[in-house]
Amino acid sequence: MSEQALRTLPYAQPTHCHRYEGRVAVVTGAAQGLGLVIARRLAEEGADIVACDLQAKRLAQRARELQEGSNQRILPYAGDLSEAGIADAMVRHALGEFGRIDTLVNNAAALIRLRLVDFTEDLLQKAVRWNVWNTLRCCKAVLPHMIERQYGRIVNIGGEAWRTGVPYHTLLAGIGKGSMVGLTATLAGEVVRHGITVNCVSPGGIETEADGAREPLPPGFREPDWTRVLRGDTPDGRRPGHWPHGPSDRGRRRGCFFRRAGGLVCYRAAPGCQRRNGDAVTVYRREKPGERIVCTSYPPKI
């Protein structure tokens, strides 16, 4: 990724909104990438943040930086939220520190991009736990408090690879991100009577290191050539238009900037956003100056 990209993508558009003053938001996967951008945006708008992640050292450093930059309280909580009892302990800790939780953003995911036949049993288990169970456990842990207060905002982070057939995303997108759409719709119908909304923001491809991190992570579990998809090529050299499934190649190749996805998350989690419930919003970047942002909602609101 070029230096120009690192300069322009992360926080180029500061916010002057103050929709979250006096409120508390839990953001999972907040040590880097989109989770870090969402946590920063919420803090800029006045929220105190419970930042959760597996990476304890990186999380502590980012929490210090966020607190210094926003003057809001940032409470780091390191742990594996997919394990039984960890999400419940996180919620108890947050309530002990702040006395309330208004917003939950389920962003944490395991970015394991491989062909299905290349997954070991251990990686299969990790992919499901870290892409599904963490979100389920966080929702279950926070809902009793939100139901008692008759208020809450939950935003699940999806992704468009499940819908566009991007290679190497069978577990990450097909099982993980795709399931967020169904979970969002069904859970929204279950809790709407309690003043709680559940929505999903589903961005196009985002390069994690574009958050401007000075110490980017190693590539991790991924097929080395998967990023060629975003440039319009399949691994065997075919153009996306020749793929046997999915919508147009334009949707496959279009990524999404952090600031656009982060801003949409903060809108859907805001106190005033009460008429949108149970839907998933897809968002891509502009391909050329002056072009409108591609944004689609599905299924219908509840």
Image (tube, rainbow, N blue to C red):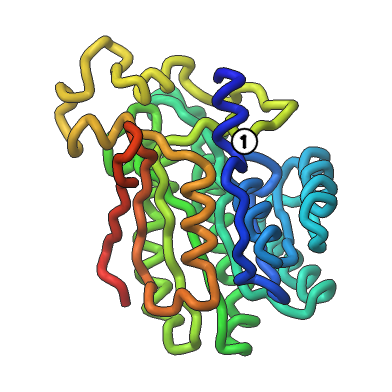
Position of 194 relative to 228 (above/below): below
- Relative to residue 204, is residue 36 drawn left or right? right
Give the image location of residue 109, x and y in percent. Answer: 55, 45
Left or right of 55: which side holds 145?
left
Residue 91, relative to residue 166: is it above or below?
below
Residue drawn at the location 50% of the way across and 80% of the way down: 196
* Figure check: 200 above or below 92: above
Residue labelled with disc 1: 211
Image position, residue 108 (x, y; %): 59, 49
The quadrant of the picture occupied by the C terminus is: bottom left
> Nearest the camera: 32 or 11?
11
Name which quarter of the figure residue 39 lies in: bottom right
* SS of the residue under disc 1: helix
Q: Position of residue 139 (x, y in %)?
A: 56, 68
Query: Which quadrant, please, contains the N terminus?
Result: top right
Residue located at (38% from left, 18% from top)? 228
The single residue placed furthest to the front in the displayed view is: 290
Position of residue 266 in the picture relative to residue 72 (left or right)? left
Say if residue 55 shows up in the picture: yes
Q: How many marks?
A: 1
For residue 160, which quarter of the picture?
Answer: top left
Local crowd size for mark 1, using a 10 Å CA cut-off: few (<14), some (14–19), many (≥20)? many
Q: Nearer the viewer, residue 26 or 180?
A: 26
Q: Is residue 28 above or below residue 214?
A: below
Which residue appears at 83% of the width and 39% of the height?
57
Q: Extreme top residue here?
A: 237
Q: Is residue 82 visible?
A: no
Whether residue 62 sits left or right of residue 36 in the image: it is right
Q: Amino acid at mark 1?
A: Asp
For the point 28% across and 55% down, which residue is it? 296
Q: Position of residue 301 (x, y in %)?
A: 30, 72
